[in-house]
Image: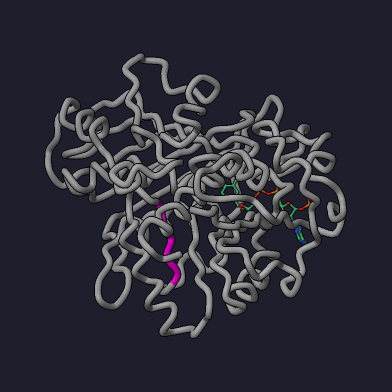
Amino acid sequence: MSKLKVGILGATGLVGQLMTYYLSRHPWFEVMYLGASKASAGKKLREVVQEKYVPKPIPDEVGDLVVEEIVPEKIPKELDIVFSALPPNIAKDIEIELVKRGFTVVSNASPYRLDSDVPLINPEVNLDHLELLKLQERNRGWRGKLVKNPNCTAAILTLALKPILDNFGIKKVIVATMQSVSGAGYPGVSSLDIIDNVVPYIPNEEEKVENESRKILGKLTGEGIEWANIRISATCTRVPVLEGHLETVFVETEKDCSIEEITKVLEEFRGPPQEMKLPTAPEKPIVVRYEVNRPQPRLDRWIYEGMAVVVGRIRKESAFKKGVKFVLLGHNLARGAAGIAVLIAEAMVKLGYI
Ligand SMILES: NC(=O)c1ccc[n+]([C@@H]2O[C@H](COP(=O)([O-])OP(=O)(O)OC[C@H]3O[C@@H](n4cnc5c(N)ncnc54)[C@H](OP(=O)(O)O)[C@@H]3O)[C@@H](O)[C@H]2O)c1
């Protein structure tokens, strides 16, 4: 089978660069186009990022590609998939323009994530929501397709909540996060603001975690998505960690559950990406650690190429009648952004959407 041709918008940013890692030597995809701002245009990707922080080294075969300024009319029509890792304000119009031109866009950017006919996908959790693409085609008359991956914190959280929801029901979730600086993109938070410090506010983050999680955990109905009837309350903070978001999660369940039962459903959880054996799917999407001092960002963030989340310190939550609490870790750039977008595209190919 000849490989599908893919492009990356925002290829020189933290998320875009990591996409090149997942897409290099990919069995189904080949990177043909790299787009970024005027400042990067005309240079090889390797040159543009040489003085920047890179989450993984740039793969040889992509490093020599020349970055182009993004002009929708000039993006090669033969691209089968366009991955977008553009800032929200830039992504907003460019992505719609491309979808109107017939491209399939899988996007990291926040605009349209909550629209009723835009699939917001965490592949192990709600791949069936891709059905919304039919509604999207009817509503908008676009020639192409727009699919979004979630905010990084919501992607990590909903993956861990899914088996708990399915087995015990969830009434309420309270989450406090410690988010890494790479979550803010490059160059991110100023060093003078974050070294020796914790910043107790990340603009718009708490609303994204609360709303997106309810959409992702919602049910597909004939009319669209019925958001999950779960009360979610988030407090998001920025900490001096390079990569990986840590979340302390408190869950009120419908049914009573023991620590052993919760541990078992988390450990045994597998989703459609594992069943379909997608190339970027982690063998185990949720890894449980039993040591009292895990998970830790530095030690655990790259497990299964950054595509699994790690749960530890599972305990009963005595503040609720029925419930548990735990510490959760996920790689914001991998599971929360670049890797999840590639996994969504793989699922779309396997299911015949591309
Ligand atoms: N970082 C995370 O953990 C994370 C997680 C989930 C989702 N996201 C979302 O993913 C997207 C990318 O995030 P990031 O962290 O990779 O950001 P970033 O490091 O700031 O990268 C932004 C990219 O967009 C390009 N760009 C900026 N302005 C442009 C313009 N006017 N025209 C064309 N290209 C332009 C940049 O190109 P130049 O290098 O040429 O400026 C760069 O390639 C954002 O929407 C973000 O909210 C990020």
Residue drawn where x is 32% and y is 41% of the image:
274
Residue drawn where x is 41% and y is 84% of the image:
138
Looking at the image, residue 264 sits to the left or right of residue 349; the answer is left
Looking at the image, residue 145 sits to the left or right of residue 86; the answer is left
Q: Assess whether residue 230 is covered by the magenta stretch.
A: no
Q: Nearer the viewer, residue 232 or 161?
A: 161
x and y percent of residue 270 in the render?
A: 27, 40
Looking at the image, residue 4 sits to the left or right of residue 165; the answer is right
x and y percent of residue 80 in the render?
A: 56, 63
Count numbered badges in the picture. Answer: 0
From what the image shows, is residue 280 above or below residue 135?
Answer: above
Which residue, as the protein is rendered here, is positioned at the far left? Answer: 256
Q: How is the image coloured?
A: one colour
Q: Which residues are magenta?
A: 118-122
From what the image shows, is residue 161 above or below residue 219?
Answer: above
Residue 321 location, quadrant = top left
Q: Nearer the viewer, residue 197 or 30?
A: 30
x and y percent of residue 178 in the render?
A: 52, 34
Residue drawn where x is 46% and y is 67% of the image:
114
x and y percent of residue 182 in the render?
A: 64, 38
Q: Nearer the viewer, residue 284 or 31?
A: 31
Residue drawn where x is 60% and y is 61% of the image:
82
Looking at the image, residue 227 sits to the left or right of residue 142; the answer is left
Q: What secondary structure is the stretch in magenta mostly built from?
A: loop
